[in-house]
Amino acid sequence: MGEVTQRTAAADHRRRGAPAPAVGSGPADTVLPAGWRVVVDRRVVALDGGRVLLGGAPPRMLRLAPAGWALLAGGGFTVTDATSRALARRLLDGGVVHPVPDGAGPGPGDVTVVVPVKDRTDSVARLLAALPPALGGVVVVDDGSADPGALRTAVHDLGAQALRAEVRVLRHERPRGPAAARNAGLAAATTPLVAFLDSDVLPTPGWLDPLLAHMADPAVGLVAPRIVALAPPEGWAAQPPVRGWLGRYEAVRSSLDLGPDPAAVVPRTRVAYVPSAALLVRRGAVGAGFDDDMHVAEDVDLVLRLHGAGWRMRYEPSSRVAHDHRTDLRAWWLRKAYYGTGAAPLALRHRGAVPPVVLSPWAAAVSGALLARRPLAALGVTAWAVLRLVPQLPGLSRPWLAAIRIIGLGVAGATAQTADAVTRHYWPISALACVVSARARGTVAAVAVAEGVVDWLRHRDRDPSVRPGLLGHVVAHRLDDLAYGAGLWWGALRHRTLEPLRPQGPRSVPAPPSAPVPA
């Protein structure tokens, strides 16, 4: 009873927004190594012949000095001196460019792999068999398995046969959750780097090298691979199609798969978090690691704490780790709802860092006008925003065209966020509106169908071996949104807070910096 009481008290403490375990104080060294190559993000928009760049994470507008413009003329450059190093650092930190992993970095001997597991003996055996040899160590943390002897035997047999590394098994007599299990492995590691791999993943060949390459940057504290769908075991090498309408949806739209493009991991951006199913971290950066009391969204919490401490984080999709996605409808839906419950404790601890919607006042007005079926009003607000922006773009050869392009991108982003809000974060409000208004029913139905079709068009080619059908994708997408939104509202009610439902405005307005980017 005492243990239960303590755990309940700890959970209440966390719900009140208590601080999490400390991470490293921030990188002491941010100097990029010579030979480091960077390329411009494909989403970056070049204005004025490439002298001004619009994009990054979060979006901003950067005016390049002549030398910087010359360096980026070919779409990227290599760090060779102090000038190119300073430019690369600033553009990397802004998400405008991405590093090109070249294999230069720490080796596998600098890595301890930590695997938290409960009862999945076969999955752990499959995972360990896929690990590269000569690692710095492997720690399997048994989080209260029913048959610890079978797990221990399987781990040690594989360690002796396939891995030229020390393999240890730690055990929690009672399940304490994946965060606590990972932390136990982290505490046992002695290498400078730790790779966390959940027991239901399978690394593909060569997965570790691109992640290690990022660690040549001393400011990087965390790197994550792309999480893809695990194909049926009888044909892993050939990657046969995933079966079932829900399996095909998850193969291209899983919450764990953050897409084919590299990114800086920055809150309130396209890649605002990375899942803990597969991570490589610098041990000195993560400190005590995850919050033991968080059984959901503990990975988002860690990312937010690392970002606040000044550590850089990267998402590297050239490294691929396969995940055994849920495809049983009930289990899948409940897991999606469970993810939504993590928004409330995150919002209480990191206020403003995980908003459901981020819109400037003019963008919110455009979205409201569109939902009210007032296209002329939306056009008027858009024109007003363009007129306001033009005087803020001095020095551009064609400021009107630049302003139209910038505001147009803002309208597109606001429209997408609004559609997502109607069908996902605020669907209970949408449902209530449909009950009392025929006009609202028509609007919500149109948004739900249009957003689903657009989502299918955007994601259907993510996995070349899977071609989800339009109807199955749209149905699964709507169920996905209903589940997450239900979990979001349940979490808000349970924690008695509106924080995870509160829209936010942008923290900064995209505008040219007061001085050119050094080059």
Image (cartoon, rainbow, N blue to C red):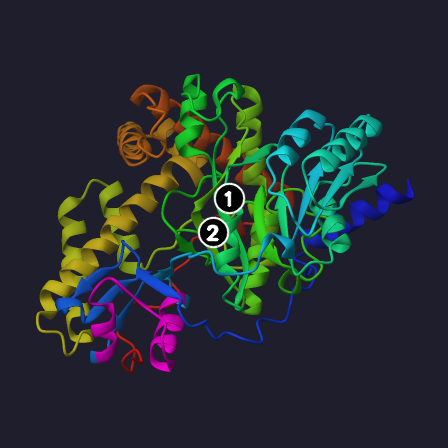
Q: Quadrant of the C terminus?
A: bottom left
Q: Which mark is residue 210?
A: 2
Q: Position of residue 381 (x, y in %)?
A: 18, 57
In contact (CB < 8 Å): disc 2 and disc 1: yes
Residue closest to the eye, 453 or 134: 134
Q: Position of residue 250 (x, y in %)?
A: 44, 29
Left or right of 160: which side holds 93?
A: left
Q: CA distance from mark 2 to mark 1?
A: 7 Å
Find disc 1 in the rendering and name its residue. Answer: 207
Look at 80% across and 49% down and name the residue there.
9
Residue closest to the eye, 432 or 256: 256
Look at 16% across and 64% down and name the residue there.
403
SS label for mark 1:
loop
Residue 40 position by quadrant: bottom left
Identify the amino acid type marked 1. Answer: Trp
Look at 59% across and 49% down and name the residue there.
299
Query: What residue range appears in magenta?
Result: 67-92
